Amino acid sequence: MALVNVKKKDHILLIGLNRPEKMNAMNREMYHQIAAAYYQLENDPELRVGLMYAEGDHFTSGLQLDDWAGVFANGKGIEPGEGELDPFHITGEGLSKPVVFAAQGICFTCGVEMMLNTDVRVAAKGTRFAQLEVKRGIFACGGATIRLQREIGWGNAQRYLLTGDEWSAEQAHQWGLIQELVEPGEQFTVALEIAEKIAKAAPLGVQGSLKSSKIAVSEGQEVAKQRLFPDLQPVMASEDVKEGIQSFLERRVAVFKGR
C-alpha cells in the first residue's frame, strides 16, 4: 500500500499521507513519495494547484526519528532523489504552483514544516501543532527555524521552538498561520473548495502572483519591484489575458488555458 495517495482531480493534484495506523509518522520512504508528488505537480502542465492532506485522525505525529538519525548526522541533510522535489524546500528549487494544506488531529514537527512551505492553510478545530525537536535532542531542520518567525513573529516562534510546547489551531488562526478554521471533518472539503477556485483562475496569473510574492519575501521588496513588470510582460501577451478581457465584456465566466 502506498504511503502517500496521489490523485489528479481535474487541474488539482491531491497528495494524501496514508499511514494512519502509525499516525502518519513520516519515514524516509514517505518523504520520497511526497517529493515525487511535488515533482509531478511542478512538471505536469495540466496541473495548476496541489492539495496536501492526510488520511485518518491525524495529519502526522512527525518524523520517524529512528529511520532518520543517520541522515541528520551526514552533514548534508535531506536530499530528494531524481524526479523528486523537496516538499520542505530546504534543498533544490521550489514550486512555481501553489499548494493548499489541510490538517486535523496532531500536526507535529515535519507536518508544521511542510505546512510552512504551502500557501493557504486550513485546519480543523482541535488540531494540535508542535515542534518537538528540542525534546528529542535535536533542533527543527525542515524549515521551521527559517520560516516560523516570519509567519507568527519572533517571540511567538521562539516560545514554541525553544520549549517544544504545543499550540492550538485557534492560536494558529489568530496568528494568521492558518487561514480557515473549520469543524472537524470539514478540513478537506474547505481546502478543496479553495484549490478549485485557484484552479479556475488564470494559471499564469496565479503563478506570477506567487512568484512575485516569494521574491519579495526571499530577496526583498526592492528586487520584487524591479522584477514586477518584466515578469508581467510575457503574461500580458498570453491567450489567457485576451480570454479574461473577452469574458468580462461578455459577462461570462472565463475559461483559462494556461497559455
Image (cartoon, grey):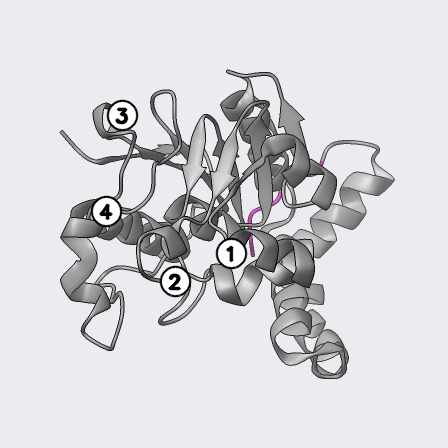
Provide the secondary structure element on which disc 4 rests. helix
Three-letter residue code for mark 2: Phe
Image spot of residue 11 (x, y percent): 47, 39
**What residue sits right under mark 4 in the picture?**
33
Estimate the spatial distance between the alpha carbons at disc 1 and disc 3, rounded to whole Å: 26 Å
| Label 2 vs 1, first from the N-terminus | 2
Estimate the spatial distance between the alpha carbons at disc 4 and disc 3, rounded to whole Å: 16 Å
Q: Does residue 234 appear in this view?
A: no
Q: Does residue 137 appear in this view?
A: yes
Query: On residue 139, which mark appears?
Result: 2
Provide the secondary structure element on which disc 2 rests. loop
**What residue sits right under mark 1 in the picture?**
161
In the image, taking residue 121 as reference, residue 109 lies left or right, namely: left
Which residue is located at x 18 percent, y 65 percent? 71
Q: Mark 1 or 3, which is nearer the eye?
A: 1
Estimate the spatial distance between the alpha carbons at disc 4 and disc 2, rounded to whole Å: 24 Å
Three-letter residue code for mark 4: Gln
**What residue sits right under mark 3 in the picture?**
20
Image spot of residue 67 (x, y percent): 15, 51
Provide the secondary structure element on which disc 1 rests. helix
Residue 15 versus residue 43: which sits nearer the camera? Answer: 15
Q: Mark 3 or 2, which is nearer the eye?
A: 2
State which region is magenta: 254-259
Quadrant in the rendering for residue 204:
bottom right
